[in-house]
Image: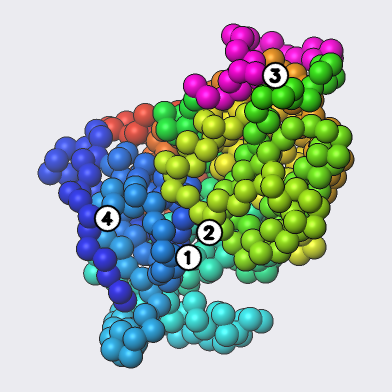
Amino acid sequence: MTRVPARGPAPVVPGVAADEPVRPVAYLTKRFPRLSETFILDEVLGLEDAGVPLRLFAIRDPHESLVQPDVARVRGPLAYLRPEPAVRARLGWLGSTLVGHARVAAGHPARYWRTLVDAFGHRQRRAALSHFVDAGHLAARLERDDARHLHAAFAHGPAAVAHQVHLLTGLPFSFAAHAKDIYVSDPEQLARRAAAAEFMLVCSESARAELAGIAGPAAERIRLQYHGVDARRFHPGETALAVPFGAGERPAASERPSASEHAPAAGARPADGERPFRLLAAGRLVEKKGYPVLLDALALLAREGHGVTCRIVGAGPLRAELEAHARALGIDGAVTFDGALSHGNVAGAYRDADAFVQCSVVLPDGDRDGVPNVVLEAMASGLAVVASDVAGIPEAVVDGVTGFLVPPSDPAAVADRIARLVGNPALAQRLGAAGRSRVLERFDRSAAVRNVARLMLDAARAGEAHQLRAPITTPQPVAARPLPRPGMHEPGAS
């Protein structure tokens, strides 16, 4: 198990005496740190700031060349379950894995052999046995660390490993479910994980409904908690919608745009010397993000004479294909592909834009977005958003109030809504202001992290599976609540 030393002092837990032990919580993800998974980094940092003593584990090191600067702020130690390619690293991993499995088998012989037999009987035997190897290795480490709870950041691989740790040792676990990890998972195995989990976190109502349909009676333990966004980092910039695209005051968020504001104003095309309307799109260059739809919409706008440019931030396997598509459409001079950027540089990109566009689609295997963090970041930055009406996006973007929702895979609809913003800068400003207000009211990161931290601390203090099985009401967006204090009863706490 490759280890990375702790990066800072242990956190001080609010409301807990300095000499009162707080058991560690293990946090398992697939790869860490990943540039495209800033929500994982944000959650880790937020939980540590809220006083949760984390032990971080990742199945693999992503070996990405660009790492978010905030990774240096992570306090807890980080360990990888899979070996590095070097022979010496593989030999060390093999030795530590064998020792770990031997310890778990000696301490929990019946559980060990029952779990191994179960893995052999799995329909996807190779994956199940791989997860079993990881689980035995991790279980031994968690027993040494005296961890009292294990949280998996995704419902597929990480939750599969966490479930097997639970089967091996009885250690309580929980997992988060987002989008792809629900839609592409084996429903039978996902139902088993849900039945054994202490709680499940979902980041959208659409994900809650999908997981609830699989989880059956365990659905009462699903908690809806949106990913929050840091509205201090993502905020409107002075350059947004600068002259000639509007310099008036932004109206109150409660004012819904009138029907007349939905029509393009006369003279929408920029005159000589005026700058074009600047669109921004951000996210991995993968199929479900729908970038071909966006490029087709930009081509329609160009043919209609609208002065629009688009900056696309993100890396991925489709970049060459998308660049070729832009050239074929004759819009390569109006579209730039910036590649991957750090969080800070992305925040600057939002402030330089006039509107944000997200053309997500649903893939044949069911994979789709949840509530993309980039949509929330754009709204926090005061941008009007044009986005597909799929999955959890309508939970953030309110059509005609904070932006426009369009049918997926419909370039003409995307172009039409963008044209409305190009022709009516006051409308774009109004939608952007309402979007920021909505983020502050419903998607504040600090409130979201406090809720998750409370669950984690309750889980670590409870320590045994049956102690967290009190019925949970139908999930709703959770309001901010203070962390538990000694003597303060919290639902599900021991």
Asked if marks 3 and 4 touch (Cβ < 8 Å), the reply is no
Q: Who comes first in sequence, dot 1 or dot 2?
A: 1
**x, y percentage for residue 446?**
41, 33
Q: Who comes first in sequence, dot 3 or dot 4?
A: 4
What residue would you read off at disc 3? 425
Q: Who comes first in sequence, dot 3 or dot 2?
A: 2
Quote the CA–CA distance across marks 1 and 4. 17 Å
Q: Within the magenta stretch, is there residue 149?
A: no
Residue type (three-letter) at the residue carrying disc 2:
Phe
Q: Secondary structure at mark 2?
A: loop
Residue type (three-letter) at the residue carrying disc 4:
Gly
Mark 3 closeness class: few <14, some 14–19, many ≥20 residues within 10 Å: many
Question: Which numbered dot is residue 30?
Answer: 1
Q: Is residue 332 left or right of residue 157?
A: right
**x, y percentage for residue 216?**
68, 55
Q: Secondary structure at mark 1?
A: strand
Q: Residue furthest left?
A: 19
The label nearer to you, 1 versus 2, is 1
Mark 4 closeness class: few <14, some 14–19, many ≥20 residues within 10 Å: many
Q: Is residue 407 left or right of residue 493?
A: right
Foreground of the two, 125 or 114: 125
Q: Secondary structure at mark 3?
A: helix
